[in-house]
Image (cartoon, helix red, strand yellow):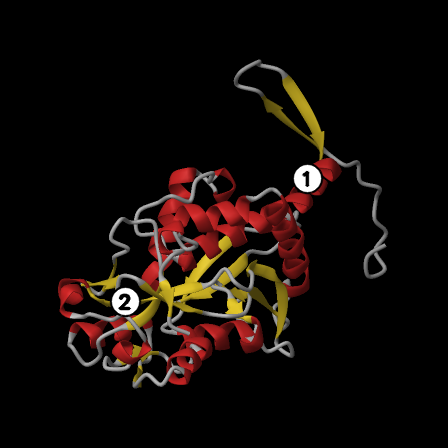
């Protein structure tokens, strides 16, 4: 009955379709079809991973070429940096952890804004890992580490065309140069200032490179890579590390998942499960070695801190 009007029983219709390959006539009940459509609609929501835009195209292209991050087997790729490895490992961990939502990279103007977007739940997570002590556990779930203590070593990167102008063998030599980093990169900032290095603040990665390119500063801390020269280029400025010296960065780096995101807890649990699998089967260690982030060629270099 509908608003007092008697209703006749309705026989549920069926849909007919013919397979173009077999000419077989099939019938699917409407109820069955509704269940199929509902099932497809219940796929997990996408994981929106937010970061500065400079590296997003690189990762998206890499995933597209492999036809999915789960198909990536080698991390030996030109111009690869830590951010890119973290993005791929995150995507792979989600899939291994059983999360079936799409992994989507979304841009933010700078690191600070990316963190705010994720903390507010407008995105699921920052793309790059955070130092454990920088991770606000009131706002984020902290995953198992993608980089453990002792695995993180940086170089002092200067303009490649000025590499031969410097002769840095010890901390006193390095203190004659001016560094630049972002004050929001707390570990980088505290490491440099703790070593007594005159350090300028920059608002973004692009700004760091532009300031070195304009000779307002001489170097920044950056991770090693698999290239013979270790060179890295941003904003048409190419940097390379001062040879023979390195800076140790103590601590662990973990992925942070927003507690304000609707799918935050589900994503966090999937990431942890996937990271355990990737750590156990050696993928994480291999990814850092193949990308050059953990680099045998710098093992004998002198640590200045």
> Residue 155, located in which quarter of the rendered image?
bottom left
Task: Measuring from the top left, give residue 305's x and y in whole percent.
Answer: 42, 74
Separation of marks 1 and 2 at Cα, in angstroms: 55 Å
Question: Label 1: few (<14), some or many (≥20) within 10 Å?
Answer: few
Task: Measuring from the top left, give residue 247's x and y in whole percent.
Answer: 39, 69
Relative to 259, say whether 39 is above or below.
Answer: above
In the displayed structure, does residue 211 sit left or right of residue 22?
left
Task: Measuring from the top left, give residue 52's x and y in whole percent.
Answer: 38, 67
Task: Measuring from the top left, give residue 154's x and y in whole percent.
Answer: 38, 65
In the displayed structure, does residue 49 sit left or right of residue 222?
right
- Residue tagged by mark 1? 36
Question: How many callouts does the rendering have?
Answer: 2
Q: Secondary structure at mark 2?
A: strand
In-front residue for pair 215/124:
215
Q: Could you tell me which residue is drawn at 85 percent across and 60 percent down? A: 4
Q: Is residue 124 visible?
A: no
Q: Secondary structure at mark 1?
A: helix
Figure quadrant of the N terminus = bottom right
């Amino acid at each position: 009955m509908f608003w007092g009007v008697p209703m006749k029983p309705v026989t549920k219709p069926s849909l007919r379709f013919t397979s173009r390959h077999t000419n077989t006539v099939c019938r699917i009940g409407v109820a069955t079809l509704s269940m199929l459509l509902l099932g497809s609609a219940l796929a997990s929501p996408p994981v929106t991973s937010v970061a500065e835009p400079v590296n997003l195209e690189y990762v998206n292209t890499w995933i597209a070429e492999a036809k999915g991050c789960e198909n990536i087997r080698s991390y030996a790729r030109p111009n690869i940096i830590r951010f890119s490895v973290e993005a791929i490992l995150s995507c792979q961990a989600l899939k291994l952890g059983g999360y079936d939502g799409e992994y989507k990279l979304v841009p933010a103007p700078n690191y600070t804004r990316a963190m705010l977007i994720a903390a507010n739940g407008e995105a699921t997570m920052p793309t790059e890992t955070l130092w454990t002590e920088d991770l606000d556990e009131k706002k984020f779930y902290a995953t198992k580490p993608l980089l453990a203590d002792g695995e993180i070593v940086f170089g002092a990167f200067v303009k490649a065309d000025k590499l031969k102008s410097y002769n840095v063998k010890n901390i006193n030599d390095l203190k004659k140069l001016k560094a630049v980093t972002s004050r929001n990169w707390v570990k980088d900032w505290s490491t440099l200032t703790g070593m007594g290095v005159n350090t300028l603040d920059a608002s973004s990665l692009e700004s760091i490179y532009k300031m070195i390119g304009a000779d307002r500063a001489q170097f920044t801390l950056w991770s090693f890579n698999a290239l013979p020269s270790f060179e890295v280029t941003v904003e048409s400025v190419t940097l390379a590390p001062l040879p023979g010296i390195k800076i140790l960065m103590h601590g662990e780096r973990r992925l942070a998942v927003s507690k304000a995101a609707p799918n935050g807890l589900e994503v966090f649990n999937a990431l942890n499960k996937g990271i355990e699998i990737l750590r156990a089967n050696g993928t994480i260690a291999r990814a850092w070695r193949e990308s050059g982030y953990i680099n045998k060629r710098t093992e004998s270099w002198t640590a200045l801190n």
